[in-house]
């Protein structure tokens, strides 16, 4: 079993927090899944990209479906920050 992904500072957008509230989900649940390598609802290609990102020090993405909609969790390449956001809020 690999070590958990360092999350750095954790932030969330207001939109993601509202969606999680509507879906009766807590952001900590998604962060725990993300940190332990449960990437949620990603295709095989994106899962492989995350495995490469862990080895190479690149950005890591998870995607979780809730009853209210989809939420992303992204840890930056330098592991300084992890953001919980809606897909449409990504840059």
Image (cartoon, helix red, strand yellow):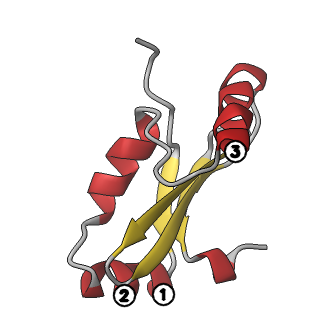
In this rendering, position of residue 27 left or right of residue 9: left
Labels 1 and 3: the sequence-earlier one: 1
| Nearest-to-viewer mark from 3 and 2 | 3
Q: In this picture, is 2 found above or below 6? A: above
**Residue at the location (76% across, 36% down)?**
58
- Structural distance between the alpha carbons of marks 1 and 2: 5 Å
Place of residue 66 in the rendered image (x, y in percent of width and height, measured from the top left):
35, 72
- Structural distance between the alpha carbons of marks 3 and 2: 26 Å
Indicate the secondary structure of the residue bearing disc 1: helix
**Residue at the location (79% across, 73% down)?**
91
Camera-side residue: 56 or 65? 65
**One can see residue 78 in this view:** no
Place of residue 88 in the rendered image (x, y in percent of width and height, measured from the top left):
67, 82
Q: Which residue is mark 3?
A: 46
**Residue at the location (44% across, 80% down)?**
69
Labels 3 and 2: the sequence-earlier one: 2
Camera-side residue: 12 or 63? 63
Look at the numbered discs 1 and 2 and tell me whether their residues touch, using CB distance below 8 Å: yes
- Res 60 → quadrant: top right
Q: Which residue is mark 1?
A: 15
**One can see residue 61 in this view:** yes
Indicate the secondary structure of the residue bearing disc 3: helix
Place of residue 65 in the rendered image (x, y in percent of width and height, measured from the top left):
42, 68
| Nearest-to-viewer mark from 1 and 3 | 3
Camera-side residue: 45 or 86? 45
Q: Which residue is mark 2?
A: 18
């Amino acid at each position: 079993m690999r070590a958990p992904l360092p999350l750095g500072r954790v932030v969330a957008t207001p939109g993601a927090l509202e969606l999680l509230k509507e879906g009766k989900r807590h952001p900590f649940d998604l962060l725990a899944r993300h940190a332990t390598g449960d990437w949620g609802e990603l295709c095989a290609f994106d899962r492989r990209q995350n495995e490469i990102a862990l080895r190479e020090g690149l950005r890591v993405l998870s995607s979780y479906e809730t009853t209210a909609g989809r939420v992303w969790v992204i840890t930056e390449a330098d592991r300084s920050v992890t953001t919980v956001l809606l897909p449409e809020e990504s840059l």
